[in-house]
Amino acid sequence: MAATSAALFSHRSHRVPDDTVFYAVYPDLQAALPLPEALSALRALHLHLQSLLSPLFSDYVWQHEPFALSLPSSLDAPCALCRSPPVPHLHGKLRFGDALDDEWLVVALLFAATSAVPSLTARVWDSDGEFLLIEAAFALPRWLEPDTSDNRVFIRGGKLHIVPKEVFLDVPSLLDALAAVRSEEIDTGAPYEVQAAIFRKISGYPEKARANMHRVRVRVPLPVAQVLKEEPSLIALAVEGFYDRDVDSMKHAAKMERFLRSNNGDIEMVRISVRLSRAMYGQLVQQKFQAPRGYTMPSREEGPAVFMEAELGMKIACGFEMMYQERRQASEEGKGNTWEAFEQSLESSGCFSGLLPGSEEYRRIMDSAFEYYKNSSLFSRTREIMNAPVQRIDEILSMSYSLDEFMGVELPPNDDDSWMYDGEEELNSAILERQKEMEVYESEKKQRKQKKGMDNACSSVADDFNLQDISETMQSFVQKLSSFEGAEVPEIRNSKSVELDTDEFMKAMQSMLGEASCKDVGSAARLEGHSSSSDMEFDDSEYDDDEVEEQEDENSEDGFMQFYSDALNEELTATTLRKSFLHARKQANNINAGPSNTATSNIANDNHDEFTPVDVDFNLVKSFLDSFSSQQGLPGPASNLLGLMGVKVPPPDAKDT
């Protein structure tokens, strides 16, 4: 049973306590360094960090316990506190309770330590896990999630480091992750947005933490005043004892055997000024507590200020009494948090299954378990921890002290406590800050989605894009006969097919470009015989005379247009306009010719320009693409016209036109 209990407790000890932050520091030491040399290096580092960091929080009052680094109990086995493998390191834990400043001050101290000593790598986490990632949640890479963040978040060189997934697809071991962070060939620096979120949080520390201190005058018994004079930090344990009181501890407050000193039947009370955190002050003020019998309190008629000083002092004195007696009793019995965890492990393992608490068999198993616990190292360590404040208080009160030491001392004024009642503005500011972060995150998320959609659309357009669409759609547009309402845009190509007459469009374009010599009888016949899509069916028997007249008018109009076209071509022959168009043979040769014979091909093609037709489709497409490219992604005539006709042209860089 003893072996089973030890195993169960070993597993239970890894349970992360609530509101506790853990931290570890790993120096760059050689892996093959002998154990004595590694311990010597750790001791030297411990002293150096203590002298480096202590001035940063020397006058700070921690909520429950101060920041401290210590050596592991053994370098030959995994660390029970920080779960580190057998590797040289320093570690520590700190319960911050309601004082979140304590937790972020620890983070600031670790950043300062790694900045001052570049060969250090630190990590920090709490009961919620990697709380640094929680703070920077809106800026994290999408792949980084709670189940993939183990052994990836570190502090080195005063910056945050995240081991990327490209280095380790699965969760890396701590040794492999440390090697990656230390390597100069692997970039493990966190993204700028993540770094900025963390630095915004810790900027101003430790001054920001000191700003949350509160000084107040209190009226306490003389022994309490003497203890606080010698050890001001013990105010944290007194407030903790008062705030976490239960029925058993309140029995000690009712007696006040240790701190209610009387002289000839009179209780000696003094006025002092104490400095504590705002969280502690709020815990004292907001709790209603009746003074124990024998503890003299002033009447309310003496004024609210006097009564407030006495009431706060009474709560502090009762807190000292409860804390002192509870710890003294726990140290004598060797029970504490470790024993409570050990007892819970027995219950969860089923050792008391089916037994009533207090029964003979229940007590027998409990006594056997406690004997094993007393023989373990946990018992002695618990006694030292629990008995430390008790021993210090006994040392202080064993020295001579008197009421005269506190008489005539000028006390600093009380700090303004309006922050307890006017915190709405600060709360709204914090909410607005978080809301701003959420808005920026949602905006960036929306932009990423839009960019992804545009990229997919451009890719789809580029894949489906055909240069012939421009020519065919333009021909359809030119052929369309307009009504009295104006020009009509053809139906979108993807939604409805469009019937085109390429010969009619080519005939019209060749006529406009002055290539009358390229007329072909077959095409002309097809042009004359083609019926427009806007023609309507009529009864021929009713309008024979009208058709004869219309035919004569059309012949006369065709003769005029032919004459006008010939005159226009003759005038344009003397200009360079004809050279701006590519001819069928010329553009084909330009595409097939290499760099060495390009000039020769151009000279040969120039001699045949007059005998080769203009490639209307090629010139049309080229002109549209040149116009579209010159728009540089902005709205313009080419994109507007093609868009109306249902032709989507990809950006110039999406497809090589």
Image: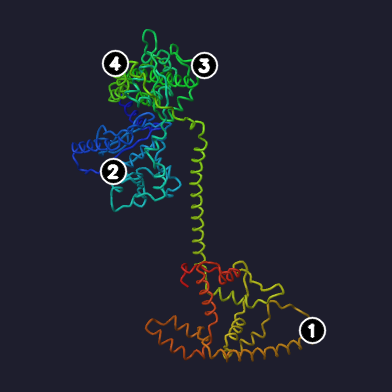
Foreground residue among 302 and 6 = 302
N-term-proximal mark, 4 vs 1: 4
Q: Quadrant of residue 232?
A: top left
Q: Quadrant of residue 128?
A: top left
Left or right of 135? Residue 388 is: left
Q: Which residue is mark 2?
A: 116
Q: Residue at x 39, y 30 (%)?
A: 63
Q: Label 4 is placed on what type of residue? A: Ser
For label 2, the SS is helix
How far apart are the two marked residues, 4 and 2, measured between alpha carbons? Answer: 44 Å
Q: Which residue is mark 1?
A: 543
Mark 4 or 3, closer to the camera: 3
- Image spot of residue 407 (x, y percent): 36, 18
Mark 4 or 1, closer to the camera: 4
How far apart are the two marked residues, 3 and 2, measured between alpha carbons? Answer: 57 Å
N-term-proximal mark, 4 vs 2: 2
